[in-house]
Amino acid sequence: MECLHCKGKMVQGTAPFSVDRKGYHISWDSIPAWICTQCGEPYLGADEINRIERALQQVDAETDGIKQGLA
């Protein structure tokens, strides 16, 4: 596999991932990813992206419930 950024060699490893949205911040320290050995750019696979999206949807629903309880 070749890095889309610098054309370096990609190896399997882990990478941090964080997101700010809807008034909250979530951070994972170690998500499985392909990492470029040359520039360090991480690329997440489709499975990891889908899992992150599902987790964020659940947090969105809980956050909406908290906000409604404050109203």
Image (cartoon, rainbow, N blue to C red):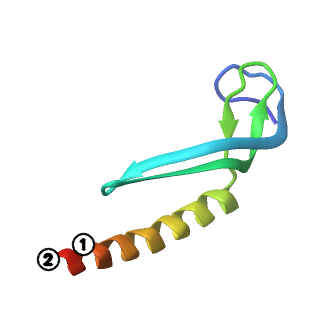
Cβ atoms at labels 1 and 2 below 8 Å apart? yes
Q: Does dot 1 land on a helix, a strand or a loop?
A: helix
Residue 68, position as x, y percentages in the image: 22, 78
State the residue lying farthest toward the left: 71
Q: Does dot 2 land on a helix, a strand or a loop?
A: loop
Residue 38, position as x, y percentages in the image: 78, 19
Total numbered labels placed on residues in the image: 2
Placement of 49 over or under 43, stated as above or below: below
Placement of 58 over or under 12, stated as above or below: below
Say what amino acid the circle numbered 1 marks. Lys
Say what amino acid the circle numbered 2 marks. Ala
**Disc 2 packing (10 Å; few <14; some 14–19; many ≥20):** few
Quadrant occupied by the C terminus: bottom left
Residue at which label 1 appears: 67
**Disc 1 packing (10 Å; few <14; some 14–19; many ≥20):** few
What separation in Å lies between label 1 and label 2 (alpha carbons)? 7 Å
Q: Residue at x 60, y 57 (%)?
A: 49
Q: Is residue 36 left or right of residue 27?
A: right
Placement of 66 over or under 28, stated as above or below: below
Q: Residue at x 57, y 61 (%)?
A: 52
Residue 18, position as x, y percentages in the image: 53, 46
Q: Is residue 3 left or right of residue 55?
A: right
Name the image quarter holding residue 7. Answer: top right
Q: Is residue 21 left or right of residue 56?
A: left
Residue at which label 2 appears: 71
State the residue lying farthest toward the front: 70
Pick the residue in front: 39 or 3.
Answer: 39
Q: Residue at x 82, y 36 (%)?
A: 1
